[in-house]
Image (cartoon, rainbow, N blue to C red):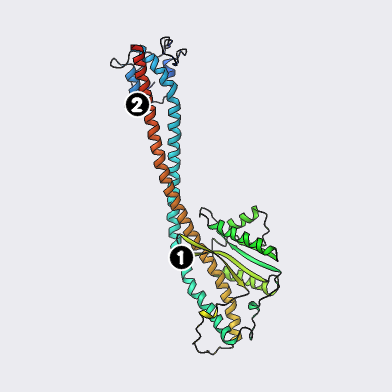
């Protein structure tokens, strides 16, 4: 039973609506319990109880008018209630999603600060190593002193490429941009030579597996725990493949960190090792003395510079991932807020329209009976 007062017609069948106007539910006979049975128990201050009290009070409509208007009310109200219920569920769902995206944005922002500091700190060291190698080769002459890792092979039969992606999604177009760039590289190079694909990151591995692209080797869990030692081990493996002539060139594709809202896709050649151009060298510097010898110094610097290049690519990719995720989650949070505003407005309009329609039908029924 709804409310605190008992309905005076409870247990009785409503009279047939013979005097109802055209288009009404004249042929339907209902029970008073059926009229209010679908309604949950509500407080007396809530609208449905007030409407019931209005029907069966001395100040409200007559009992005959109640027979007519209640039939229209019951016919229309369940659909409106179902629609409002769906909108409320949708609003709750969007609110929960907004809380999740807002939390993910804050976590990504905290991780971005550390990753950005690591990526920016690695740039001067990598640049200095490259300039040292370029300085030694510039004073000695690259053709006078040939290092195995500097050997350029004109007839390339096999090329290796590393696709650096992330283990997690929800980062906008971060992973997709790398996958598309590597896929284009595979199509271009496969016409001339064989291409070996190495994946770093679960998203890139899944992308190429779903397309049936052969993967030479995957490095699971690497992007979750990047370290210089891990990068050095991979660099040693790549150098050994190059020295054994299993591959003639090695490339790495990664996202270079520009800012929190901008990343740049880069395809960098690791092997054969290419030092910086002559414009970046200090031509006025004096030729230093090398101990134990220039060759020994170069044999030590080139592998280290290669491992640092690979390590820097991983750091840049991690910083870019957190920046892309922070931007994507911020955009998702803003979109959820806009959606909530639209849903709230639609909910209020639907609720007001249902109330207005029922009031119009009650007044119309009263006028029809009084006329």
Residue 265 in percent (x, y) is at 54, 63
User: Picture coordinates of residue 41 (x, y %)?
Assistant: 39, 25
Asked if residue 283 can be seen in this view, the reply is: yes
Q: Quadrant of residue 209?
A: bottom right
Say which element carries label 1: helix
Residue 179, quarter of picture: bottom right
The quadrant in which the N terminus is found is: top left
Q: In the image, what residue occupies the spot 38% across and 31% down?
A: 351
Q: Which residue is mark 1?
A: 116
At 64% across and 84% down in the image, what residue appears? 143
Q: Give the residue pinned by disc 2.
A: 47
Q: CA distance from mark 1 to mark 2?
A: 57 Å
Most foreground residue, 327 or 31: 327
Work out which quarter of the rendered image holds the C terminus and state it. top left
In the image, residue 306 lies at what x, y percent? 58, 74
Q: Which mark is residue 234?
A: none
Estimate how packed mark 2 is, as few (under 14), some (14 to 19) or many (20 or more) residues with alpha carbons within 10 Å. Answer: few
88 to 284, vertically: above or below: above
Q: Position of residue 216 (x, y in %)?
A: 67, 62
User: Extreme left residue here?
Assistant: 59
Q: Is residue 217 visible?
A: no
């Amino acid at each position: 039973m709804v409310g605190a007062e008992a309905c005076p017609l409870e247990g009785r069948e409503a009279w047939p609506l013979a005097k109802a106007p055209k288009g009404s539910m004249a042929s339907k006979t209902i029970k008073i319990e059926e009229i209010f049975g679908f309604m949950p128990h509500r407080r007396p201050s809530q609208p449905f109880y007030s409407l019931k009290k209005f029907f069966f009070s001395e100040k409200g409509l007559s009992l005959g008018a109640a027979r007519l208007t209640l039939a229209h009310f019951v016919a229309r109200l369940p659909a409106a209630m179902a629609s409002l219920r769906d909108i409320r569920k949708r609003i709750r769902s969007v609110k929960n999603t907004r809380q999740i995206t807002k939390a993910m944005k804050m976590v990504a922002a905290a991780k971005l600060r550390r990753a950005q500091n690591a990526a920016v700190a690695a740039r001067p060291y990598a640049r200095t190593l490259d300039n040292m190698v370029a300085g030694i080769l510039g004073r000695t002459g690259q053709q006078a002193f040939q290092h195995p890792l500097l050997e350029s092979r004109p007839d390339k039969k096999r090329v290796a490429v590393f696709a650096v992606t992330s283990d997690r999604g929800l980062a906008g177009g971060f992973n997709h941009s790398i996958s598309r760039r590597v896929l284009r590289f595979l199509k271009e190079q496969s016409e001339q030579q064989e291409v070996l694909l190495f994946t770093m990151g679960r998203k890139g591995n899944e992308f190429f597996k779903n397309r049936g692209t052969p993967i030479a080797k995957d490095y699971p869990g690497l992007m979750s725990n990047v370290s210089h030692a891990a990068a050095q081990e991979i660099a040693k493996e790549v150098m050994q493949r190059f020295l054994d002539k299993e591959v003639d060139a090695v490339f790495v594709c990664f996202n270079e960190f520009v800012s929190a809202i901008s990343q740049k896709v880069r395809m960098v050649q690791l092997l054969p090792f290419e030092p910086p151009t002559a414009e970046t060298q200090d031509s006025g510097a004096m030729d230093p003395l090398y101990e134990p010898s220039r060759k020994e110094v170069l044999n030590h610097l080139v592998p280290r510079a290669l491992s640092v290049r690979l390590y820097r690519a991983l750091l840049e990719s991690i910083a870019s991932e957190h920046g892309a995720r922070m931007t994507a989650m911020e955009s998702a949070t803003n979109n959820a807020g806009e959606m909530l505003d639209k849903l709230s407005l639609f909910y209020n309009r639907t609720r007001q329209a249902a109330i207005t329609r029922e009031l119009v039908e009650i007044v119309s029924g009263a006028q029809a009976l009084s006329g």
